[in-house]
Image (cartoon, helix red, strand yellow):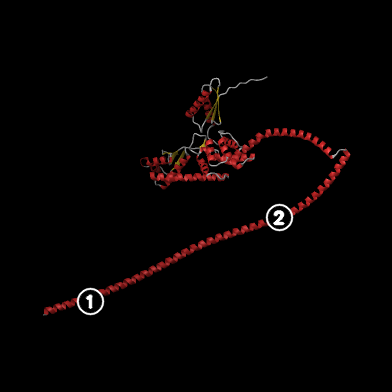
């Protein structure tokens, strides 16, 4: 019985302790939650204040910027208003000047009308006096007006004929004396007005680098980078012991320029590997093409040439990257165009047409296809293809006498082309080398059997060979022409092509005394 009571008492004590601990735990949790809520309210209030401050700062910044924009706009508006006021003042001044001029013109008109009336009155008086004098002369001379007039006309005819013959003779002599001088003056003034800088032609470009360490990166592992560059650009890249420099070698200046710009981009970017090289080279080629088109457009705008086909504009731009005997082709063509315009103006011809023909006369040197054709004939074909006029096409094709000239523009283009190439400093080819080439051509022709004389003409572009008619037949003359052309082709270096003409003729000459 006592043990049972004791167990009951223990159970109830344990139960009471559980209830008390649960109540205490609940009270502690409630107290902690109240503290957390208070802290959260404090933090949220702090965040709220911070956000409000940030919003106010941002608002002030935007307000300041907006005020700046408004002030700038107000300044621009004030400036424009001031300019408009100045223009209004100028317009008013011009109107005043015009009004003053109108008033003066009216006064002058009135004075002229008065003078004209007085002159008409005097003319009437003179007519009356003239008729009186004529009647008086008829009475004195005993001749009628018609008889006197016919006699006077006959005497004046004889005198005028004598004077006219003398005047014509003196005019012809003066023209002969002054024609050469005037022509020289025109040519000299034309050259002085359009003469450009001396010719420079290089097949090598130097690419400067900051340090020699970049050379190894350009070469790449086992030379892969430099091989990729050479393959994609078509330019020989020479990396030697020259400090801080790489040499780019190529006869095509367009390729050389592409290689130079691509190397510059690669070195500046720092990423040099085959894939990157191909990408940069392709982009550079596209940029160069756009640059060529812009050069062509600027050239025709500067010269005042309109309605030129886009293909021809591109060819004009590519002239910048072509040269002949060291003379830049674009500079040469611009010079010829200006010379043609000056001479056409002096002769009273179409200036715009002459300038157009002068610019396009060497267009056949630009295309890479059909190299066997002379550049004049090829240029004429291109001009015909893209809708140029007959005068321009004939001037292009005839400026080296490949075809016959049929208008006055063609000889002007031919003369101006010769002037541009012949002036001092225009071309880099030495005179000695030029003379040597002509002598070699003539000696090569004279070495053939049956050749009596040989003449190199057209600046070495044509070789005239005269054979003896008693030693050489017509069939043998054809063979001589072929042999000489083959020897020239195999043994000599020359620009363009050389035309070999063999002449065989028989002459019978007698003199009657």
Q: Is residue 262 above or below residue 466?
A: below
**Which is in the foreground here, disc 2 or disc 1?**
2
Q: Quadrant of residue 218?
A: top left
Q: Is residue 186 visible in the rendered structure shown here?
A: yes
Q: Quadrant of residue 156?
A: top right
Disc 2 or 1, which lies upstream in sequence? 1
Q: Which residue is mark 2?
A: 102
Q: Is residue 195 above or below residue 463?
A: below
Give coordinates of residue 162: x percent, y percent: 77, 33
Give coordinates of residue 2: x percent, y percent: 11, 80
Marks 2,1: beta carbons within 8 A: no
Q: Which residue is mark 1?
A: 20
The local crowd at label 1, few if under 14, some if 14 to 19, many if 20 or more residues have their Cα within 10 Å, is: few
- Quadrant containing the N terminus is bottom left
Q: Is residue 271 above or below residue 435?
A: below
Residue at 46% from the left image edge and 65% from the top image edge: 60
Give coordinates of residue 57: x percent, y percent: 44, 65
Residue at 51% from the left image edge and 46% from the top image edge: 294
Q: How many marks?
A: 2
Position of 76 with respect to 248 (left or right) is right
The local crowd at label 2, few if under 14, some if 14 to 19, many if 20 or more residues have their Cα within 10 Å, is: few
Which structural element holds mark 2?
helix
Position of 275 with respect to 513 (left or right) is left
Question: Viewer-proximal residue, 487 or 422?
Answer: 487
């Amino acid at each position: 019985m006592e043990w049972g009571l004791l167990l009951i008492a223990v159970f109830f004590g344990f139960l009471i302790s559980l209830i008390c601990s649960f109540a205490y735990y609940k009270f502690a949790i409630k107290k902690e939650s109240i503290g957390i809520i208070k802290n959260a309210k404090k933090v949220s209030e702090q965040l709220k204040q911070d956000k409000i401050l940030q919003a106010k700062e941002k608002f002030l910044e935007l307000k300041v910027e907006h005020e700046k924009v408004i002030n700038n706009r107000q300044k621009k508006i004030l400036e424009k208003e001031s300019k408009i006021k100045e223009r209004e003042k100028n317009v008013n001044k011009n109107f005043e000047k015009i009004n003053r001029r109108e008033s003066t013109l009216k006064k002058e008109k009135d004075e002229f009308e008065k003078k004209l009336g007085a002159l008409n009155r005097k003319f009437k008086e003179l007519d009356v006096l003239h008729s009186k004098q004529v009647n008086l002369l008829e009475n004195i001379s005993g001749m009628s007006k018609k008889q006197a007039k016919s006699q006077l006309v006959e005497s004046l005819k004889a005198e005028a004929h004598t004077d006219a013959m003398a005047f014509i003779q003196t005019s012809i002599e003066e023209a002969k004396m002054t024609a050469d001088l005037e022509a020289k003056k025109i040519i000299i003034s034309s050259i002085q007005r359009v003469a450009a800088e001396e010719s420079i032609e290089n097949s090598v470009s130097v690419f400067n680098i900051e340090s020699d360490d970049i050379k190894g990166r350009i070469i790449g592992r086992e030379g892969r980078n430099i091989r990729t560059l050479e393959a994609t650009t078509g330019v020989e890249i020479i990396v030697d012991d020259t400090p801080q420099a790489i040499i780019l070698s190529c006869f095509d200046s367009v390729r050389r320029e592409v290689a130079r710009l691509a190397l510059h981009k690669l070195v500046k970017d720092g990423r040099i590997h085959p894939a990157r090289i191909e990408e940069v080279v392709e982009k550079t080629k596209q940029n160069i093409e756009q640059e060529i088109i812009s050069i062509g457009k600027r050239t025709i705008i500067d010269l005042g040439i309109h309605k030129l086909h886009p293909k021809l504009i591109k060819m004009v731009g590519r002239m910048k990257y072509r040269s002949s005997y060291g003379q830049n082709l674009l500079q040469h063509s611009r010079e010829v165009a200006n010379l043609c315009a000056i001479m056409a103006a002096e002769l009273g011809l179409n200036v715009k047409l002459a300038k157009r023909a002068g610019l396009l006369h060497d267009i056949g040197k630009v295309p890479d296809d059909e190299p066997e054709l002379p550049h004049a004939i090829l240029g004429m074909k291109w001009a015909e293809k893209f809708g140029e006029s007959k005068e321009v096409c004939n001037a292009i094709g005839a400026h080296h006498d490949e075809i016959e000239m049929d208008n006055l523009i063609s000889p002007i283009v031919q003369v101006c082309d010769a002037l541009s190439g012949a002036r001092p400093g225009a071309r880099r080819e030495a005179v000695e080398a030029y003379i040597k080439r002509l002598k070699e051509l003539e000696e090569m022709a004279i070495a053939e059997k049956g050749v009596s004389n040989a003449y190199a003409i057209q600046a070495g572009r044509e070789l005239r060979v005269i054979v003896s008619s008693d030693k050489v037949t017509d069939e043998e003359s054809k063979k001589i022409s072929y042999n000489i052309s083959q020897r020239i082709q195999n043994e000599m270096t020359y620009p363009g092509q050389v035309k070999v003409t063999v002449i065989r003729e028989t002459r019978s000459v007698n003199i009657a005394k």
